Amino acid sequence: MRNLKSIFILTLTLLFMFSSVAFAMGKEFDKEIHKLINPSIKWDSKKAAQVEAEMDKILKGDREVTTMSFNVQNMTYIRTDTLNASDLPYATASGTFKLYRENVPDNNYDYYVVWMKGTGINAVNTGPFGDNSNLYEVRVSTYLNRANDRITDWEPYSDITMNENYVTVSLGVSHGGVNASISEDILLHRDHIGPAAIYTTSYFKAHWNGNYEGSQGVVAGLEMRVPKGTGYKYTIGLLVDGGQY
């Protein structure tokens, strides 16, 4: 009888542990906001410009926003989509996702670039003594939705760590002897930006990750290769994580 009771207790304990892990994973996934993107999905150019202008105040700091801080070569601009996310009461975030088509020769494939930007803002007076909250993570993601599409390049390729200085995120590609590139400068207050996860048949996630009482952002990009003439279809994602200390 004791053995049966012990087995029963062990079973309940394992079930509880599994449920707790599953709940935590589900909570993390649920915090990321998603949106499907394809040519039939409308986008608001005026709203996108307004959102990006507010984000650039965080990403650029005191530096004047000029064409020198954002450069695109041999790509055709298609659209900009936006997302908002929150981790109330500690943080909110905005994201923009620009889509470009590369002007490169290839008889079999078309190449697109998704340029992702995300900014997180901490909250004020959230602590018991009027303390402000801290920002832990701002993450931008792109997910492929079709079996024959591939992620063929991405940036940042590794972590970039800086303290109160500007960093450049740059994606350069070449196909059929023709080059194309995109780059942008952002202010990194502390900690690092870099890849959060990459799986070339499924997704690329990039983030700012650290512990900072203030606002911070991330810039990242990826190249998508799709069969010739099939257009584009993908899902964008935005996540922010914050806490009191």
Image: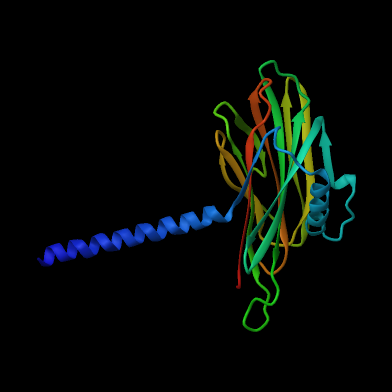
Viewer-proximal residue, 47 or 238? 47
Decide which of 159, 49 is in the foreground and name it. Answer: 49
Residue 46: x and y in percent read: 84, 47
- Direction left: furthest residue: 1
Please state, as top left, top right, bottom left or bottom right, where the N terminus lies in the image: bottom left
Q: Is residue 31 left or right of residue 107?
A: left
Question: Residue at the spot x=81%, y=43% of the render?
Answer: 45
Q: Is residue 27 above or below residue 130?
A: above
| Residue 162 in view (yes/no) | no
Q: How is the image coloured?
A: rainbow
Q: Nearer the viewer, residue 41 or 33?
A: 41
- Residue at position x 62%, y 66% from top? 88
Q: Give the image quarter of residue 243.
A: bottom right
| Relative to 115, 46 lies left or right | right
Provide residue 214's location: percent of width, then percent of height. Answer: 72, 67
- The front one of 130 and 230 is 230
Res 85 → quadrant: bottom right
Task: Classify 174 as above or below 114.
Answer: above
Instruction: Name the residue at the top extreme.
Output: 107
- Taking the image as drawn, is residue 2 in sight? yes
Describe residue 150's horizontal placement relative to residue 50 as left or right.
Answer: left
What's the residue at 68%, 74% (across, down)?
A: 132
* Count of marks placed on residues: 0
The correct choice, above or below, for 44 with respect to 211 in the image is above
Residue 170 occupies quadrant: top right
Quadrant showing the C terminus: bottom right
Q: How far across and how far down the image is residue 16, in percent?
A: 33, 62
